[in-house]
Amino acid sequence: MKIINFGSINIDHVYGVEHFVRPGETLESESYSLFSGGKGANQSIALARAGAAVLHAGNIGRDGGWLKTKLKEKGEDVGRVETVAEPTGHAVIQVNREGENAIIIHGGANRCVSEANIDKVLEKAEKGDLLLLQNEVNLVEKMLEKAEALTVVFNPAPMTDAVKDYPLEKVDIFIVNETEGEVLSGEKEPEAILSAMQRRYPKSRTVLTLGKVGVIYAEGEQRIKVPALQVEAVDTTGAGDTFVGYFLAELSRGSDIEQCLEMGVKASALCVTRQGAADSIPSLDEVLNAAS
Ligand code: RIB
């Protein structure tokens, strides 16, 4: 089984700041780095580092060839990464001294997906494959409509008003943080979010990620909680993407849910101890050797 990930590919401009810039303020950054990123690409890299077979689909501009090379690093199939006239998408990321981030994205090439693109990607799908989607490319609603026999995993990040109108009944597994869960469920507390999600989407399962607290998995009445590992955060960018990749890679190996959640939690804990998004995703060996 392979995982088809139709998602964003970004150039990340990362600025270390003493605090996030305030309205009307001009702030000198303490550091600057250029990384590869994009929620989609980060998740594909995490999947591949975790040992899953992954086909990444998405768009870059003519300035993005190096990102495609980076995506190929661990054997990802990039045969469905297209080069379009728009420049590659990018992100402007502030990282403060606590390792928290504030991100602006510009979609660029990521917003140039066509229905023809989607059909071409789905031609590669075989029975039992899993389709992974985030919300940084256009036409996600069409991808959900067309996914049919595939297991669909949706990480609605970044959350937008349009998401509620997507055909979300097609989703088999939601992976949401508290903010995304709150918008989809109308609830604020973790258990209330999960119960509302189960009522609204009774055929789906939900993984709720809670940052420093850990994760909770919900399927019907069942709940599985896995606490986060306590680490010194340097940069939290890409932690959620790392969780998604490691969780799904383990799921694709047929492991039980608790094991999948534990792998995701360990991998994302290692990710936050390093700078950058894609570059901070740990290898499978590092995750296997990490203390619980
Ligand atoms: O989730 C982190 C990612 O969000 C960054 O790499 C940035 O590109 C944005 O898409």
Image: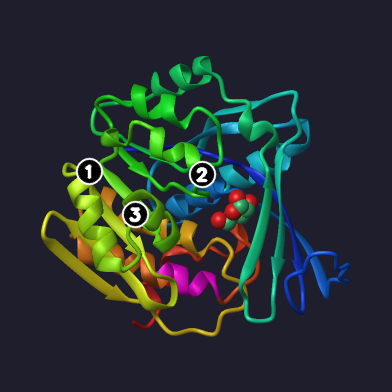
The reply to whether discs 2 and 1 touch (Cβ–Cβ < 8 Å) is no
Any mark on residue 60, and which? none
Whether the residue under disc 3 has CB within 8 Å of ligand 1 = no
Q: Residues within 10 Å of mark 1 (few under 14, many from 20)?
A: many
Mark 2 or mark 1: whose residue is earlier in sequence: 2
The reply to whether discs 1 and 3 touch (Cβ–Cβ < 8 Å) is no
Any mark on residue 160, and which? 2
Residue 168 position (above or below residue 237) = above
Query: With 33 as the anchor, is 199 left or right in this view?
Result: left
Q: Residues within 10 Å of mark 2 (few under 14, many from 20)?
A: few
Q: Looking at the image, which is closer to me, 193 or 106?
A: 193
- Give the CA separation, mark 2 to mark 1: 19 Å
Q: What residue is rendered at 42% in x and 54% in y?
A: 180
Q: Nearer the viewer, mark 1 or mark 3?
A: 3
Q: What residue is rendered at 57% in x and 25% in y?
A: 113
Q: What residue is rendered at 54% in x and 73% in y?
A: 272
Residue tagged by mark 3? 186
Query: With 170 as the anchor, is 100 left or right in this view?
Result: right
Residue tagged by mark 1? 201
Q: Any magenta on residue 271?
A: yes
Q: Helix, strand, or loop for circle 1?
A: loop
Q: Outermost residue toward the left?
A: 221
The N terminus, quarter of image: top left
Asked if one can make out residue 253 in the rendered structure from this viewpoint, the answer is no
Q: Looking at the image, which is closer to me, 198 or 50?
A: 198
Q: Specify the amino acid type for callout 2.
A: Thr
Q: Specify the amino acid type for callout 3.
A: Gly
